[in-house]
């Protein structure tokens, strides 16, 4: 092809997957487009597995899809087409785990099943305990994610043999630790290495719990006991080996009980310090040390202040050389100080567990900018950061690299969804959207997750920003496959917005922390429609919020369907927060719970009105105030009421009108009105009784003597005027005196 004329030319190149069976074909633009369309359709179908991840940043979506395709192609292989076309632990299982997170659980199972049968070599000559721990813990992780026990059952004898071997090591060791094994592939020293011990402990603990769940109590009791022995011994060794620095940082060496293991300052100044940065965090994320403890605070400070990270990526200095210099003729990816992101999975897991969200966001963009090729998303094992003479681009070592690909995918997943486990390794809490970049919820943007596998079942949620109107809409589907101790949603919006109040399914929800942007959904189930209202400007203090909500708490808000609080006949609406208010919690007490309960239920007495004092306690944080309302509850309405009017002249001399009222005044058919007239008093009194059918709600009676006592009854039938009682139901009674 002649390129001398300077015009653009197109060349088509084919890579023959099976040259021996390939016939003649013409490679041209048409054939190229056909093959490309078929390839795209294949991967589109493969990626469309029911799990949806959508974030409002095109480069992130492109990277996610590209890296998933790469790792689905690589399978258990660390790389392809170079010396790294082989398996490695923990890298291979980490890659499989991340594929499962994105819905590719069949592929995860296949990779892990293959890796169980692979080893770099028996005994202390390598680091077999580390391998075993990874296989055990990842088998448990797959079970919790899918509730599929077939991987464990198919490899049960092999997995149990790992734990039995470790049990024998613990018994034989003077410290009850696992035997000393090789530090790593590149570091040949033999020690009680922290990452070996911690990962193996977690694997034994986790799989023991699975055996308990599956009903194999003998295996559970045997190996959970050994895991506890190892945990105690390991924490003792860590305590004896740690160094507490003057600034509060804590250094935990990889090589436990080794007096030569001293803090690195900075961490990557030496080669062994760089390798500490690669492997030791595997122990930190095993759960052997409480993430929220002061001890972990000190460890985190050491990593942060002594140089573990560059733009959230894992710093590494292979040769080592000073910052700004290089190793002439050195390996690509390592000839200058740089990063080794293969081992970033443990680092970013630690960031997430420590709620170091901004550093996790930095790691995502650091990886996009400096850990992959631009636009094509290819990674090697290590990456140069410094300048090397004559090289315009950075270099990396033996690309592609499945574990490095998995780092970006893990960061994205940890931003969107994270689970935590309890001290026994059992899934406990669910965290949603805990570390998303704030720009992803600018006005008009949306984050969507559908059917993403978790330890509790598939999770779906959507966050839609309407910040120009000061609110975010969220829809969350809570999984119900397994119990969740606590569920938290964090809504990270651009700076300048503060949560004002929250509603769930249209009702006020007070269980949130505006400062931390966390909405506690614990106890909620099913589909939730959440509206988060915001204010702009300076945050309102708790005392200011209480004052505002106290002023906003009015009779109009609580009277319900009553006309006012002086004439209460129905239940009150004792709200627990002010609609679109400041998010304070309102609790109610009543001076008479029998009449007005603290939830607003009203019970009316048959006779007489009741005056009740309601006290509202308005609280936010440590600020609190009260507000009182005086309420009059009217007596209960009667079905029938008889009223006798005042005496007036007319008829035979004097008349009175008897009126029937009440809630059933229209229902008088078949009833009788009995009227008794009493002239005089005592034994000389003259008594006259008349009985009439109650044909209307009003009757007029007359009599001759002024001041005659008139008494009336509304009855169910003709009464017995001679017996001890009337022998009928008396609905109402009235008397003039």
Image (cartoon, grey):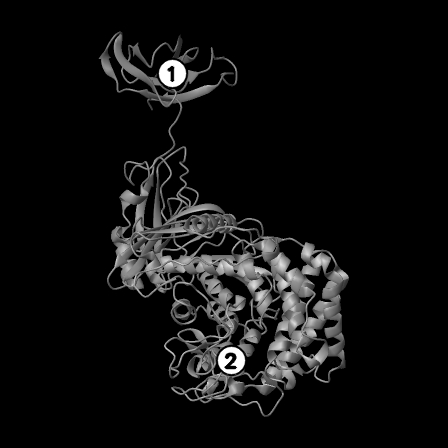
- Residue at the image point whose x is 38% and y is 17% from the top: 712
Q: Position of residue 206 (x, y in %)?
A: 65, 65
408 vs 21, left or right, is left
Q: Position of residue 275 (x, y in %)?
A: 54, 82
- Residue at the image point whose x is 58% and y is 49% from the top: 481
Q: Earlier in the sequence, mark 2 or mark 1?
A: 2
Q: Is residue 289 visible?
A: no
Seen from the viewer's position, the closer of residues 318 and 82 is: 82
Seen from the viewer's position, the closer of residues 590 and 282 is: 282
* Few, some or many residues within 10 Å of mark 1 (<14, 14–19, 20+): few
Q: Relative to 696, is 252 above or below?
A: below
* The N terminus: image quadrant: bottom left
Q: Are marks 2 and 1 in contact (CB under 8 Å)?
A: no
What residue is disc 2 on? Answer: 277
Q: Relative to 601, is 691 above or below?
A: above
Q: Secondary structure at mark 1?
A: loop
Name the outermost residue toward the bottom: 260
* Few, some or many residues within 10 Å of mark 2 (<14, 14–19, 20+): many
* The C terminus: image quadrant: top left
Name the outermost residue toward the left: 649
Q: Relative to 406, is 457 above or below?
A: above
What residue is disc 1 on? Answer: 685
Q: Which mark's residue is nearer the viewer, 2 or 1?
A: 2
- Give the numbered dot on residue 516: none
Name which quarter of the figure residue 143 lies in: bottom right
Name the outermost residue toward the top: 652
Seen from the viewer's position, the closer of residues 81 and 721 is: 81
Q: Position of residue 99 (x, y in %)?
A: 54, 59
Q: Position of residue 45 (x, y in %)?
A: 50, 47
Q: Secondary structure at mark 2?
A: helix
403 vs 377, left or right, is right
428 vs 163, left or right, is left
């Amino acid at each position: 092809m002649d390129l001398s004329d300077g015009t653009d030319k197109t060349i088509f190149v084919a890579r023959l997957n099976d040259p021996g069976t390939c016939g003649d074909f013409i490679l041209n633009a048409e054939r190229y487009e056909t093959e490309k369309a078929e390839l795209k359709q294949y991967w589109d179908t493969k990626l469309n597995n029911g799990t949806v991840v959508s974030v409002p940043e095109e480069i992130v979506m492109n990277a996610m899809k590209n890296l998933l395709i790469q790792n689905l192609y690589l399978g258990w292989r660390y790389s392809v087409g170079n010396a790294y076309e082989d398996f490695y632990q923990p890298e291979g299982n980490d890659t499989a785990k991340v594929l499962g997170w994105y819905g590719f659980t069949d592929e995860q199972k296949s990779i892990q099943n293959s890796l169980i049968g692979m080893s770099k070599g028996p005994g202390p000559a390598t680091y077999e305990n580390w391998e075993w721990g990874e296989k055990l813990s990842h088998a448990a992780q797959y079970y919790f994610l899918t509730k599929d026990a077939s991987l464990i059952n198919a490899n049960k004898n092999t997995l149990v043999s790992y734990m039995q071997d470790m049990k024998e090591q613990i018994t034989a060791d003077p410290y009850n630790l696992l035997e000393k094994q090789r530090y790593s592939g590149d570091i040949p020293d033999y020690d009680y290495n922290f990452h070996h011990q911690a990962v193996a402990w977690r694997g034994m603990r986790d799989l023991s719990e699975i055996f308990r769940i599956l009903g194999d109590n003998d295996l559970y009791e045997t190996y959970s006991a050994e895991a506890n022995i190892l945990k105690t011994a390991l924490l003792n060794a860590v305590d004896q080996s740690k160094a507490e620095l003057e600034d509060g940082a804590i250094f935990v060496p990889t090589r436990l009980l080794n007096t030569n293991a001293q803090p690195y300052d900075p961490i990557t100044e030496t080669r062994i310090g760089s390798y500490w940065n690669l492997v030791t965090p595997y122990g930190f994320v095993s759960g052997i040390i409480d993430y929220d403890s002061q001890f972990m605070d000190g460890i985190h400070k050491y990593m942060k202040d002594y140089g573990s990270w560059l733009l959230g990526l894992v710093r590494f200095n292979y040769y080592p050389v000073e910052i700004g210099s290089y190793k002439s003729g050195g390996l690509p990816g390592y000839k200058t100080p740089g990063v080794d992101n293969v081992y970033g999975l443990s680092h970013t897991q630690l960031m997430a567990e420590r709620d170091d969200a901004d550093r996790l966001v930095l790691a995502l963009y650091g990886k996009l900018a400096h850990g992959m090729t631009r636009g094509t998303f290819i990674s090697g094992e290590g990456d140069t950061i410094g300048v090397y003479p004559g090289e315009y681009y950075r270099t990396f070592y033996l690309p592609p690299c499945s574990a490095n690909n998995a780092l970006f995918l893990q960061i994205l997943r940890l931003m969107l969804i994270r689970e935590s486990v309890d001290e026994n390794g059992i899934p406990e809490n669910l965290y949603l959207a805990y570390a998303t970049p704030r720009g992803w919820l600018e006005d008009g943007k949306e984050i969507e997750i559908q059917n993403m596998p978790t330890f509790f079942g598939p999770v779906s949620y959507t966050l839609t920003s309407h910040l120009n109107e000061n609110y975010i809409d969220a829809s969350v589907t809570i999984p119900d496959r397994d119990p969740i101790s606590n569920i938290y949603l964090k809504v990270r919006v651009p700076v300048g917005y503060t949560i004002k109040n929250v509603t769930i399914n249209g009702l006020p929800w007070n269980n949130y922390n505006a400062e931390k942007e966390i909405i506690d959904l614990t106890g909620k189930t099913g589909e939730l429609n959440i509206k988060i209202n915001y204010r702009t400007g300076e945050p309102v203090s708790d005392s200011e919020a209480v004052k505002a909500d106290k002023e906003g708490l009015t009779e109009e808000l609580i009277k319900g369907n009553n006309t006012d609080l002086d004439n209460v006949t129905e239940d009150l609406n004792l709200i627990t927060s002010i609609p679109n208010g400041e998010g304070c919690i309102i609790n109610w007490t009543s001076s008479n719970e029998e009449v007005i309960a603290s939830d607003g239920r009203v019970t009316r007495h048959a006779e007489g009105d009741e005056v009740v004092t309601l006290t509202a306690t308005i609280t936010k944080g440590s600020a609190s105030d009260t507000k009182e309302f005086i309420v009059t509850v009217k007596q209960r309405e009667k079905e029938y009421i008889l009223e006798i009017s005042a005496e007036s002249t007319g008829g035979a001399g004097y008349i009175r009108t008897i009126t029937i009222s009440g809630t059933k005044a229209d229902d008088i058919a078949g009833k009788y009105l009995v009227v008794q007239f009493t002239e005089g008093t005592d034994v000389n009194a003259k008594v006259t009784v008349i009985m009439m059918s109650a044909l209307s709600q009003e009757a007029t009676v007359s009599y001759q003597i002024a001041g005659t006592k008139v008494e009336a009854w509304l009855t169910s039938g003709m009464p017995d005027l001679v017996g001890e009682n009337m022998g009928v139901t008396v609905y109402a009674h009235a008397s003039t005196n």
